[in-house]
Image (cartoon, rainbow, N blue to C red):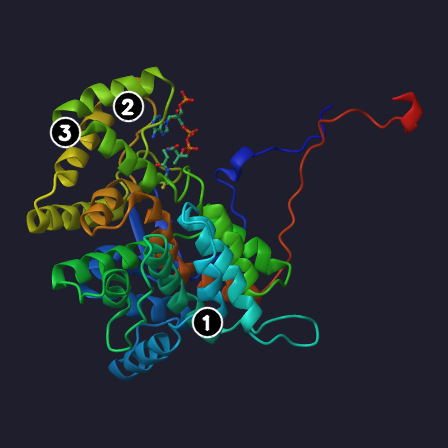
Amino acid sequence: MSTGMVVDRGLEGVVVGHTDLSNVEGQVGRLTYRGYDIDDLAPNANFEEIAHLLLYGHLPSAKELEDFKRELASRRELPGPLLTAMQTVPKTAWPMDVLRTIVSGLALFVPVNNHGEHVSDVHSAIELIAKMTTIVAAWDRIRRGLDPIEPRADLSHAANFLYMRTGKVPAPVEEDAIDTYLVLLADHSFNASTFSARVTASTRADIYASVTAALATLTGDLHGGAASATYTNLVAIGSPDKAEKFVHDEIAKGNRIMGMGHREYRVRDPRAKHLEAIAKDLAAHSGTKWYAIARELENQSQRILAEEHPDRKIYANVDFYTAPVLADLGIPGDEFTCLFACGRAAGWTAHILEQLHDNRLIRPQATYSGPPPGPFVPIGKR
Ligand code: COA
């Protein structure tokens, strides 16, 4: 039955709102945060400056940055009962499941008003950004049978994360790598997880519920799970000379090449070149093979996918070089999506506050394709 309604499966090309936070220009491959090009931000600004930019609307002055860093550092510790709860989780639990559950659990330790609501403001946003890296690092250690390491207030957000995993202050090249990674992942307009956060916030659910929804949405391998899947591919390939056969085999099996393709970009994802440069530096620092395999996998994938899809340009996306970067930092492949979440927490929380500031319930429609109206069938007659 035709209703005359236009159905846009996947909302491709549908504009569902406006934002001041970031702009994705898919045809030219440009990403800006509040008007600043990530090509300028990635080499020049740290994650704390970007989180401030997104949450407060401007790049911080030196004094504002100090205050912001102090607040972020002061909010890193987790409530003791949550750390205890993490100790009881099966060690086989998937890191994103742990992160989502514990972020949701944070709400239990924050006072509610008479309607059961938590305050959703810039401070609860900073709280969530600060604590997410602590959760990821704590689970990383707990599942290895090690005690969590307390956060250090004197370290940057990036350095403190690596420190909480290993107990060692990272080398500058490692700190810079994770810091730039977090900068590049901080926001990306109305991507699926951000949209999910905004849908949840639009019901006037609070920031904890909204970030939990975003975490759930990020999990899938068509979104934040692609970097882990790319790493699995790099391991399976093993050496650069096997990349070509791998791509042919995957396509013959009907599989997608993870880390390739994007809904918005019709050119190479602008974040990929920065991540590729970091991956190259880290490979030189650590002597691993991940960058070399990834480089050849991208060449082969781009060439073979262009033959398969002459009408559609399929290039590396942000997740592609995330895999060698995070692998070289010693982070296990199944934790990559958690790191994505730690960066995107800045964007999610800024979007949630933006949504709440000028809210309208997000409630789309669907065309109905089930049976026509009919009489109820009593249970004895079914
Ligand atoms: N490997 C192989 N083929 C791919 C592909 C990939 N990575 N990405 C897209 N394609 C193909 C599809 O199979 C499809 O072919 P068809 O028309 O013959 O069915 C065509 O390109 C269009 O794909 P579609 O799924 O409609 O495009 P989309 O806009 O929904 O795709 C992604 C965007 C990200 C979902 C898609 O590129 C993908 O699945 N990539 C791999 C997962 C990934 O890296 N996700 C992270 C995104 S940041």
Residue sitting at 37 percent across and 48 percent down?
Answer: 337
As shown in the figure, which amino acid type bears the numbered disc 3?
Ser
Label drawn at residue 80: 1
Residue 265 point in image, percent of width and height: 34, 40
The secondary structure type at the circle numbered 3 is: loop
Q: Are marks 3 and 2 in contact (CB under 8 Å)?
A: no
Residue 14 appears anywhere in the view: yes
Q: Earlier in the sequence, mark 2 or mark 1?
A: 1
Gap between marks 1 and 3 measured at Cα: 44 Å
**Is the CB–ligand 1 distance for label 2 below 8 Å?**
yes
As shown in the figure, which amino acid type bears the numbered disc 2?
Leu
Decide: few, some or many residues near mark 1? Use Cα within 10 Å; few <14, some 14-19, many ≥20.
few
Decide: few, some or many residues near mark 3? Use Cα within 10 Å; few <14, some 14-19, many ≥20.
some
Label drawn at residue 305: 2
Residue identified by numbered label 3: 239
As shown in the figure, which amino acid type bears the numbered disc 1?
Gly
